[in-house]
Image (cartoon, rainbow, N blue to C red):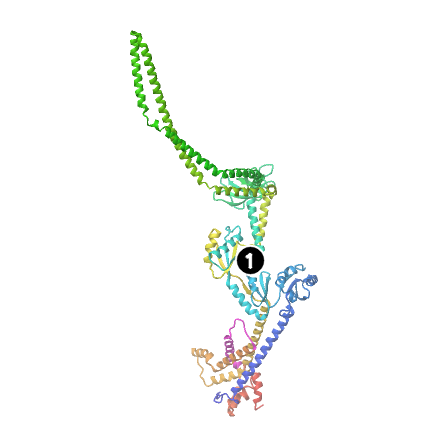
Amino acid sequence: MKISYRKWKVGKKSFCWDVLILMVVSIFIGSLLAGTLSFSANAYFSKTLSNLVGDYGQYDVIIQVREELKQDAEEQINKVIADAFPGAVMKEGPTITGKTSIFISLPEQFKTKQVYDDLSKTFGSIPGGAAVGVMTDPRLTIRGVPDGAKNMVMDKISQLDGVRFAFHDGASIGVVLTSFNKSAAVSEQIKNLLKHYQVIEISFPVGSEPSNPIRLGDTIANDMQNQLKLEYARNVSIGGKNDDMTYMVGTMMELKRFLADYATQVTLKPAGGTKFVPDEVLVFQGTAPQAPQAGSPVNKANVLVKITDVHADGTAAGLIIQGDASALTNLQGYKVNNSVIDAAVATASYRNPRQQLGNALNETAKVVGQIPGFVQDAQNMGQVALGALNNYDTSVAAIRSTLDGVRDAGNSIQSATSGLTNMNTGGMQAQLANSSKALSSLITTLKVVKMLQPDVANTIDGLNGTRQNLDNLKAGLSALDNVAADARQAKATVDNIVVTGNNALNTLQAFDVNGARTSLQNANKHLAELQQMNLPLITAQLQYLSTAVPNLKDEDISHSMALLDKFIGGQVIPGARIQILTTNNISTDAVMPIVTHDAGYNNVSLYSTSLGVIEPNPRSEMYEVLNQVKAILAGLTSLVMTILFLALDHTSIMAVIRRRRLSGTVKAKGWRKVLKQVTAIFSAPERQYGMVVGAILLTAMFILSGGGIPYLPWIGVPVIGAFLGSIMAGYADKINPVAGDEVMAGQALGMSFDDIMREIVIPNGRPGVMQKLNKRKLQFK
């Protein structure tokens, strides 16, 4: 069968024009049907959603309660609304999985940060385990912000244009906007704000946790800001909604540190071959009547010590967890296994800071009691010293006058004895001695002569008198010589006294009398101020403190520390992690040296995370899902309509084109047949027609109906249409077979291709749009 295509040209009377009209009508019908179906489904689901949660911005608060307590909850909610939110409207919502939703619309005057922050407290008395949520629109939600940074972030967000207020929304930050039109601009500003900051997380390995992470975090943040010249650096490692919680937790940590220092410090010395293990418990006799015995259970009267640290030399530090240090009379410690006493393993020594503190307070009170007498004595001494200083100049002048008198006396002595000093009394004494000896010899001779001549006696007596006078003169000269020596010694002594006195006088003159006088006056002033203090009151308070020092047992201290650990553990980020909020222009490598220096060791890990992310609004996400469902329904409907249009209207045309291609061709065999079949997939005219028509139909209906398929790019739409058209072309003869005999008969009658298609092929084909459009051109009905 051969059909001429010479008349297949575009014209108002050609069959090609019929195909174009068919395409337009098919696209219109398919798009209208797909759009109507998707719009109807979207309207239905949107209406259902509105019935469930209200229209956009209609309600502000949602409260979920247990279904069986719904009635009681509604009554309580009405009371709360009447008291706290006059004019608010409540509506009961649907019940899902045993939970009933109750919606509340608040008047505008109650839409404030304070009200929204306190919503959980306001509705905290609702029975049925009520969960309170916020539904106010337009609203943005920011999640992932550390609790310690939320206030700062909310303050900055509240200053943005288009933001009504920001509030605590559970673990996130809620941002209520002034209008929906501001959503995009505010969202972009918040993204830029979050990008401007980063959170540097500092993780510590097990066993190296800081004792006070809050203080260490503050130190690291201050050092970062000072050393790296950062715009902003702050420790945000706290699980609280305000800075008050930060201070409270810091106080708790300091209290724990005080208790740790206040507790008795037990030092354990191991017995031979014993090795201590942290958290191991040792038992001591305590107030029990007898020492612990191996195999016996632990008695409540025993003292239990928990090992907290093991030193390199084998000794250990311990904390008393049962009993008190005052009961540690027997210092022999025994190991405990499952509350049963084992062998002796340690000898203990301890230091009780509480006792030392009490003694120190008592001694201080005694010292303070002696202060009044000390002040009085010091004031008296000060007055005496001031009097001495006032007479200082007179005393110095008197000393100078005395030195001048001594110097004059020395000069007088020197003048008086200068003649004696120049006399040679030694020679005169020698001559007198010689003369005395000569006279003695002469007298001796005369005594012999006297025996012969008695008349010589008078001469002897005269010589004796002369010799005596010479001896007396010699003695006088000797005394005179001693006087001269004493005069010289006195002069030297006087000179030495004058020199020493001058040195002492110079030293006295160099003394700062005015400075000393001022110091004494200031000291007397301070002593007077000290005397004015209410020292008896201070003494009484010290005595009160000594008696008011917490009379805690060691077991009370250990239990209190455990409770503080539990509380702090719920506020400080777990895992010994510190979070520092800073700007994003600094790397962790630059921060690492500061962290290692402040922490004291190098085995820490640093990570940088974003400050937070904007969380999509649930309602907006729901509407987005509905829009996606609408697009999917439109796309699937367009896909189905494309298949129907191809199958009912275009397979007959593709079948005619295929018959014309195969007419007069020789059938190939073997691999040539396979090759020809493969190449025909893309080169066969009927397949090309099917791919073009399928691509146009599907793409046009997708565009006009708003269709879309998730993860399918727009370039894939015409590809799918072309694929469907190619498949339909391959099965055209089976879907819409052509009556070859009737076609040949029409050719024999001289009918043109357009007439054959309109009068024979289309009327005998599958019922579709083409048949409806073709009826107006049928000549043989």
Q: Tell me if 396 is positioned left or right of 251 in this view.
A: left
Q: Is residue 717 magenta?
A: yes
Q: Quadrant of residue 354?
A: top right
Residue in the foreground of this view, choosing between 131 and 352: 352
Q: Residue at x 31, y 19 (%)?
A: 433
Q: Tag 1's secondary structure?
A: helix
Residue in the foreground of this view, choosing between 284 and 326: 326
The magenta span reads 705-734
Q: Position of residue 361 (x, y in %)?
A: 57, 41
Would residue 302 be visible to someone looking at this image? yes
Type of amino acid under label 1:
Gly
Q: Position of residue 358 (x, y in %)?
A: 58, 41
Q: Residue at x 62, y 74 (%)?
A: 43
Would residue 543 be visible to someone looking at this image? no
Residue in the foreground of this view, choosing between 369 and 470: 470
Q: Tell me if 236 is positioned left or right of 489 in this view.
A: right
Q: Quadrant of residue 553?
A: top right
Q: Circle 1 sits on which residue?
A: 148
Q: Name the magenta segment's main secondary structure.
A: helix
Residue in the foreground of this view, choosing between 519 and 313: 519
Q: Position of residue 277 (x, y in %)?
A: 51, 45
